[in-house]
Image (spheres, helix red, strand yellow):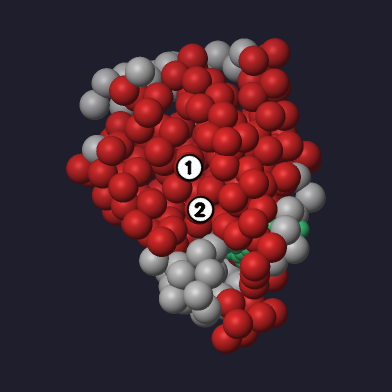
Amino acid sequence: GAPRDAAFFRHWLTAVAEAVEEEADRLTELDSAIGDADHGTNMRRGLAAAVSAVEEERPPTPGAVLVLAGRTLVSTVGGASGPLYGTLLRRTGKALDDAPEVDLGELAGALRTGVDAVARLGGATAGDKTMLDALLPALDALGDGLDAAARAAEKGAGDTVPMRARKGRASYLGERSIGHQDPGATSSALLFTALARTARA
Ligand code: ADP
Ligand code: MG
Ligand code: MG
């Protein structure tokens, strides 16, 4: 696929921040059903800080952009999602090393490393009703392109509705977590829809 430089990755983060801003109320509403009603607020604060940081520092490579964004998420988001998304971006960024440009195949490989790190950190696997239920299907679809990955992430988020939560706050609800869409899977889908949109622009 087309090579992407540091500016592309800054634009991606900006697009994620915009999508999170637009969907913040929905994310918080989903989290009020099976969590503590702060996912929209958490994500909004973290992404706004991440965008500010990369716009100010302008790291020279895609990897450095993602590492800085991930570090910023960890330090600005108090909830579980801060360290988890922070790990996703930091580990994906580290896997890209200091390449000035990366293509879709390289990004897919790096994202695989990042998502693996999220799974290890949170101890969750597919079907536990977490962000992984959007991230894993998106990764699997990336070989078919960014639009396919975005669609797979959205479907994955929707597919969390009938699941029973086995990780995170929602797991405290047991059976009562069934019938609600996972907030973190929903924000993970925004990550991939924003990526597809940024590549199209
Ligand atoms: P908190 O639960 O601390 O309030 P957020 O509301 O910001 O944090 O994020 C909740 C989301 O984090 C959940 O919807 C879920 O997708 C994700 N999550 C929570 N725990 C885990 C975990 N162990 N592994 C993967 N994702 C998790
Ligand atoms: Mg919460
Ligand atoms: Mg919280």
Q: Dividing the image into 4 quarters, which one contains the N terminus?
A: top left
**Element on which disc 1 rests:** helix
Of residues 53 and 148, the one drawn nearer to the viewer in this rendering: 148
For image coordinates 51% across by 64% down, the residue present is 181
Residue extending furthest toward the left = 144
**Element on which disc 2 rests:** helix
Horizontal relation, residue 87 to residue 98: left or right: right
Q: Amino acid at mark 2?
A: Thr
Q: Is mark 2 within 8 Å of ligand 1?
A: yes
Q: Position of residue 17 (x, y in %)?
A: 59, 31
Q: Is residue 36 above or below residue 96?
A: below
Of residues 196 and 70, the one drawn nearer to the viewer in this rendering: 196
Q: Position of residue 6 (x, y in %)?
A: 49, 17
- Give the tally of numbered discs: 2
**Residues under labels 1 and 2: Cα distance?**
7 Å
Within 10 Å of disc 1 (Cα), the crowding (few <14, some 14-19, many 20+) is: many
Mark identifier at residue 186 = 2
Image-quadrant location for residue 168: bottom right
Mark identifier at residue 190 = 1
Tell whether label 2 touches label 1 (CB within 8 Å): yes
Residue 86 shows up from this direction: no
Q: Amino acid at mark 1?
A: Leu
Horizontal relation, residue 94 to residue 133: left or right: right
Horizontal relation, residue 197 to residue 15: left or right: left
For image coordinates 57% across by 42% down, the residue present is 23
Q: Is residue 19 above or below residue 43?
A: above
For image coordinates 43% across by 53% down, the residue present is 135
Of residues 157 and 105, the one drawn nearer to the viewer in this rendering: 157
Q: Is residue 91 above or below residue 117?
A: above
For image coordinates 70% across by 13% down, the residue present is 56
Of residues 159 and 109, the one drawn nearer to the viewer in this rendering: 159
